[in-house]
Amino acid sequence: MTRNLPEWAYLVDETGRYWHHLGNGTRQSAEGDKASRPPGKSLFAIATNDLVSIPQWVSSKDSSIIDEVVEAEIAKLGIHRNGGPGKVSDWKPVELNGTRTLVQSLATPWSLEEFANSPARSEFVGFFPHYALYPPPPSSAVLWKEGTNWVAGYSRGNRWVHVQTLGGEEMRPLLAGEINLTLIELAAKGLLEGASRLVVWAPYDLDLHRALQEETGLPVTFETRPAPAPESAPAWNFEPHEVTRARLGRTRRRRALFIGFALLFVLALLATAAVLHLWHLESSNERLRAKIEANREDADEIESAMARWQTFSPAIEPRRSPVELFHLVSSLLPEKGLRLTSFEVRDDKIIEVRAEGAAMANAIQIKGAFEKDESLSDYTWVIPPPRAKGDFTEVFATGTYRF
Amino acid sequence: MKANEKRLLAALLGMLLLGAAVIGSDYYFERRNLLLAEKTALENEWVVIETLFEEKEIWEVRSAWLAQNQPPFTTAEEVEQSIYQEALAKDVDGVSTSKQTLLPTLTTSDFVQAGVALTASGELKDVFRWLYDLNRPETFHVIRNLKVAPDKEAPEKILATFELLRWYAPPEA
């Protein structure tokens, strides 16, 4: 997989920090206020004194198990990995031996002061262990300086397996001894299969040469440090907490902004829909009103004709004529056993009927007949209970026009 | 601008937006309900008009029939004389009338009414045949306050007391 590398790297050598163009190898000073700003998007090389290296054999090939083992080892050192959302530790396999894996774990146990003090932190787009940018000489111990600090790295085959900061110039007389001890320790743990030589990436120094050779018994060579080759280095993954926080904050702000705009958009859509709906209702009402107005005159004429007809209904509608009502009422009376004694229509609205029956049953019969008859349904009937009058039963019914 | 100031500004803008949304939605729903109510009223009005139009021909025919058949008003004396003569029922077989009383002439926008209160006596079928004849629609007679009862003096007869009215077309203004 090709990594997307920035144009510049913020490196450190014995002279201190400097800007290095990863494309053409140009070097730019990082001293002075102006020069301290990155010339472009840059890779931040984490100095070795900000790293803790733990090489170890893990009896598994499973990366999740290795993860757990590495985490436990780092925790044992007292490094708090959960101090923030960033990535402050990582591991890379160095060698696979059957069921065992040799891994190198790296952790940044504290915040990167150099990064924190940088005037343009947002220009750093990647974080990488400084030493890992350089291909190691095969099966060697390597010594170099990062600023004022001496750093020793150890390779197994063509891979770095361990790195350590030895200290400043005051450690110079002890460098050979420290390296020798580390070589013995690494070899004893099976982490190193015996270094074949010791390489110093520094200008030639006779005293140092002698001291190293005498102490370690290895051939010592002084070489120029190779050019950084991040594209061929293992893909270490580091990100300080503050960078992750800033990135997550940006993501949150973008999301909030997006949600805000989406809400505004939805509100604008709803408002537009509401305005269109009201406009549609208003215009359809207006059309209907215009249609009604256009036909109102004709409708009024018809209504007027209806009212006039209603006015004339006593003269021209036989159904409400008293003569017709008499016919209707008398047709509902039983042919035998009941005699109509009085029939009256008052004010075209009230019908009063009196009758005499020979039996109570005849009288009761009238009540049902009047109330159920379709032709007299425009009248509400009040019919008190029949009462005895001599040998007969008298019935009295009053019908009132409903309309 | 500091982060907390930005948050405060965002909160204020949010509240403003929320307030505007509440006011806007309130206005929208109020206006919508008003327009929907207006729409329902207009639709009902239109349904009434459509129903009227469905019967338009009938009412035009009826209106024309009224105009054509309603007797014209001439003079008060003439119409009173006419209705009084009818109330006498001189040419009607089996019916005799009595107690004729002229009623005051009544004028409305639709008709001028002339009328007589009377009592008719005779057999039921004769009296009602006469009444049916009077009550034909094209004559514009109205029979009002009809009271029918057996004649106590002649049980085979009835006494029918009523007001006989006639509605004349009012004179053109």
Image: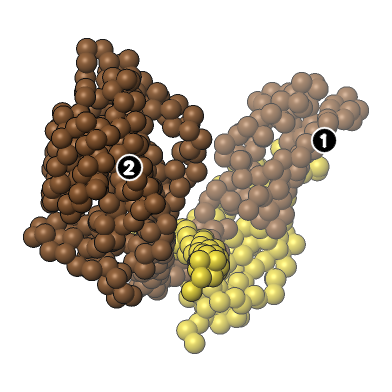
Question: Can I make out residue A210 in this image?
Answer: yes
**Amino acid under label 2?**
Leu
- Image height of A11 relative to A330, above or below: below
Residue at x 83% of width, y 30% of height = A386
**Amino acid under label 1?**
Pro
Q: Nearer the viewer, residue A80 or B35?
A: A80
Colour brown, chain: A
On residue A384, the disc is 1
User: Which chain does the numbered disc 1 sit on?
Assistant: A
Report the residue marked by disc 2.
A175
Question: Can I make out residue A87 in this image?
Answer: no
Q: Farthest residue toward the right?
A: A390
- Image height of A5 relative to A89, above or below: below
- Image height of A187 relative to A18, above or below: above
User: Which chain does the numbered disc 2 sit on?
Assistant: A
Q: Nearer the viewer, residue B83 or B41?
A: B41
Q: Secondary structure at mark 1?
A: loop
Q: Farthest residue toward the bottom?
A: B173
Q: Farthest residue toward the left?
A: A24
For chain B, the rendered hue is: yellow
